[in-house]
Amino acid sequence: MKRSRLRAKAVPYLFISPFFIGYAVFGIYPTLHALYLSFFKQVGIGPKTFVGLGNYAQLLSDARFLKSIAVTSYYAAGSVFIIVPLALLLGVILNTESVRFKHFFRLFFFLPLLTSGVVVAIIFGLIFDERYGLLNNWVLAPLGLSPVRWLLEPKWVMPSIIILGIWRWTGVNALYFIVGLQSIPQELLEAAAIDGANRLQTFWHVTLPLLRPVMLFVVVLAIIGSYNLFGEPFILFGQGTGPSDSALFMTVYLYLTGFRFLKFGYASAIGYAMAVIILILSILQLRFFGAFREV
Amino acid sequence: MKLGRMKSVKAPRRKVPRLSELGLRIFVHTALIVGAAATAMPFLWMISSSFKLNSEIYSYPLTLLPRHGTLSNYARLLAGAEIPFVRQFVNSSIVAAAQTILTLFISSLVGFGFAMYNFKFKRALFVFVLGTMMIPAQVTLVPLFLLMHAFRWLDTYQAIILPGSISAFGVFFMRQAMISSVPAELLDAGRIDGCSEFGLFWRIGLPLSGAGLSVLGVLTLLGSWNNYLWPVIVLRTTEKFTLPVGLATLIGLYKQEWGMVLAGAFLATVPIIVLFILGRNQFITGLTSGAVKG
């Protein structure tokens, strides 16, 4: 009797144990080991030298690391201020009664998300080609604009990657906004209309504030996505960082440092620095969107 | 939530729209069509160019349909002199299938535990599971690689499959699925009939949460099929590469031969298209499951 009761008590823990055992091995241990490694200089399987916070100090004066923050932030700003508003606009349009075929469009616009980053980079390599690319020949030329050296000139590199990002992520973000729009009680919009608000006013004063949780979700996702961006820029620039490091995203720098130059200690410090930056940004956004007030 | 059944905002209907209203509608629909064309174009360009000779890809004027359609790109790719494409396709399938099955099993097991039992520290442990999602993968890349090295797992599939199947999102998602689709009374009835606790999970919990499993399944399949960063770190030999790693080497080595590279890119995308046709509702549900709560 006693034994069976003990067993009954153990059952739920047995059910949940696979996650915790797995995470201990593949999550907790590496997370702690990374912290430990970040205090050492180690190249390949060579000797380890303790440097304390030396790696972190070095990060602050590492021009390439600072460049990678700038590149990532530039892209993050592009996604927050270009992709997110476009997605909001698309979401509102595809949630309007009078728009035809909206169910088809909803599905269609999020197809690019499903494609592998490597495949996307391959396709866009040809689209951005200076001489035989679609953009220069079929978009710019008919408008009478001269060809742009998309992937070759540093100042055009980020606009190129943002164009790729618009293509890839506008649709799914629009989908998030549609879900948010549909959770807004109809009566509120009707009440605003009865009070004499026009559509723009209703949108600005009623819809937009109520979309705040979804907006937060989308913006956080957009920023975390910038820090995770790897395959697209890495393959687009021939497994490299673009002209003058103009596509040196943080994850690309981490990968190159850790797995091309085998600086395990320094790469671990980069990983921790990224985690801290992402954490701070997430908290700032929670504050900014006032999510704390409701909790 | 099925997309086809999402309700739409009811605008007050007028029989005859005003002229400005009509203009706006025309503008909006034109913009949508242009947007849809821009969305489709890269795909169409990939498919069309994969049937062109390189001499045609590098010639003016650009044409949407190949002037001299050819299968030579596909023949060359599948012959495998550049990369063992067929082998890599099979590799990707094995890894994606194994990772999906294992992820579904572990996530539903753990989700069932959190959903169906009360136990000490349940809340704290669940918060811990959610908290693990805050730690970006970049932190663990180097030590996880060293761990795989120590296990002698480099260049093996378990190095991708096993770490990949511990999914906090999966646990969170399956817990929700179990709560909403498995009635506790049914489990009690099973207990009275002498079913073991694992039996309750296997015979009642799993079958009833089929909808949730299919959603998590398509998301995991897609993620695994497209995964590049971790496989490129742990895989070493071309024979073992998954498709994204293989395609990356292909474009690295044969950048000028667009036709062949795009043929590979297209073939790697075909399974995704099939998956999308079969599971589009699952994709929508899965992708938007986090957005509602924010």
Image (cartoon, rainbow, N blue to C red):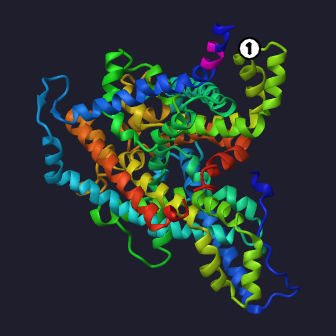
Q: Quadrant of the C terminus of chain A?
A: bottom right
The chain identifier of the residue carrying mark 1 reads B
Residue reaching furthest right? B15
Q: Tell me where residue B211 sits by quadrant.
A: top right
In this picture, is B219 found above or below A42? Answer: below
Residue in view at x 47 percent, y 41 percent: B131
- Residue A22 appears in the picture as rendered: yes
Q: Amino acid at mark 1?
A: Ser
Task: Please state the extent of the stretch shown in magenta in the rendering.
Answer: A6-10
> Is residue B43 inside the magenta stretch?
no
Q: Check the image and report above or below for A270 versus B106.
A: below
The residue identified by callout 1 is B196
Q: Does B294 sit left or right of B247 as displayed?
A: right
Most extreme residue toward the front, as rendered? A2
Q: Is residue A65 left or right of residue A215?
A: left
Q: SS at mark 1?
A: loop
Taking the image as shown, residue B201 lies to the left or right of residue A134, namely right
The answer to which of A60 and B109 lies nearer the viewer is B109
**Residue drawn at (51%, 65%) of the image:** A293
**Residue B227 x %, y %:** 48, 37
Q: Residue at x 49, y 49 (%)?
A: A120
Residue A268, position as x, y percentages in the image: 26, 37
Q: Is residue A131 visible?
A: no
Q: As rendered, which of A96 and B112 lies closer to the eye?
A: B112
Q: Quadrant of residue A43?
A: top left
Q: Quadrant of the N terminus of chain A?
A: top right
Q: Position of residue B145 (x, y in %)?
A: 33, 27
Q: Which is the main secondary structure of the residues drawn in magenta? A: helix
Of residues B161 and B83, the one nearer the viewer is B161
Q: Residues within 10 Å of mark 1 (few under 14, many from 20)?
A: few
The residue located at (77%, 27%) in the rendering is B207
Give residue B6's position: percent from left, percent from top: 77, 59
